[in-house]
Structure formats: structure tokens, C-alpha cells
Image (cartoon, grey):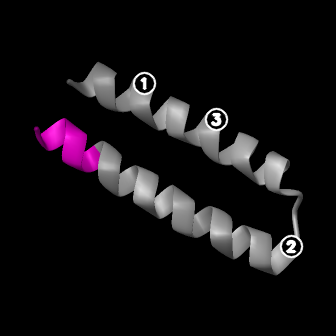
């Protein structure tokens, strides 16, 4: 349950971060989505390894 809360918090933070990046740099949506998805994937793997 705690791992799920951590992942949910990370995902929410990544979504907010991507919105900020889009506003600041005017990045293409697909690029920003790819970056966020990649970071989320890595964060998920790290969280799973930590247990």
C-alpha cells in the first residue's frame, strides 16, 4: 500500500513537472510525454527493487 502511495505521488509530481516544462520551454507534447514516461518507468523500477 505504501509503495502505491509513493508511486502515485511520483506520478502526480511528474505530471505537474511536465506541465511546467511545457509552459517554460514549449516542448512538443510527445517529447515531454516520452520524458515523463521514461522517468516514471525508472522510478517504478527503483520503487519495486526497494520493496
In the image, which residues are magenta? 1-6
On residue 45, the disc is: 1
Q: Is residue 48 magenta?
A: no
Chain-order first, disc 1 or disc 2: 2
Measure the C-alpha gap from mark 1 to mark 2. 28 Å
Q: Residue furthest left?
A: 1
Give me the residue at 63% from left, 47% from top: 36
Secondary structure, mark 3, is helix
The answer to whether the residue labelled 1 contacts the one labelled 2, judged by CB atoms less than 8 Å apart, is: no
Give me the residue at 82% from left, 47% from top: 30
Q: Categorize mark 2 by other alpha carbons within 10 Å: few (<14), some (14-19), many (20+).
A: few
Q: Residue furthest front?
A: 29
Residue at numbered disc 3: 38
Quarter of the rendering containing residue 49: top left
Relative to 5, residue 1 above or below: above
Measure the C-alpha gap from mark 3 to mark 2. 19 Å
Relative to 47, residue 29 above or below: below
Secondary structure, mark 2, is helix
Measure the C-alpha gap from mark 3 to mark 1. 11 Å
Magenta stretch, main secondary structure, is helix
Amino acid at each position: 500500500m505504501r509503495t502505491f502511495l509513493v508511486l502515485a505521488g511520483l506520478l502526480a509530481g511528474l505530471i505537474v513537472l511536465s506541465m511546467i516544462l511545457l509552459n517554460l520551454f514549449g516542448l512538443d507534447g510527445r517529447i515531454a510525454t516520452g520524458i515523463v514516461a521514461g522517468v516514471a518507468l525508472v522510478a517504478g523500477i527503483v520503487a519495486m527493487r526497494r520493496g
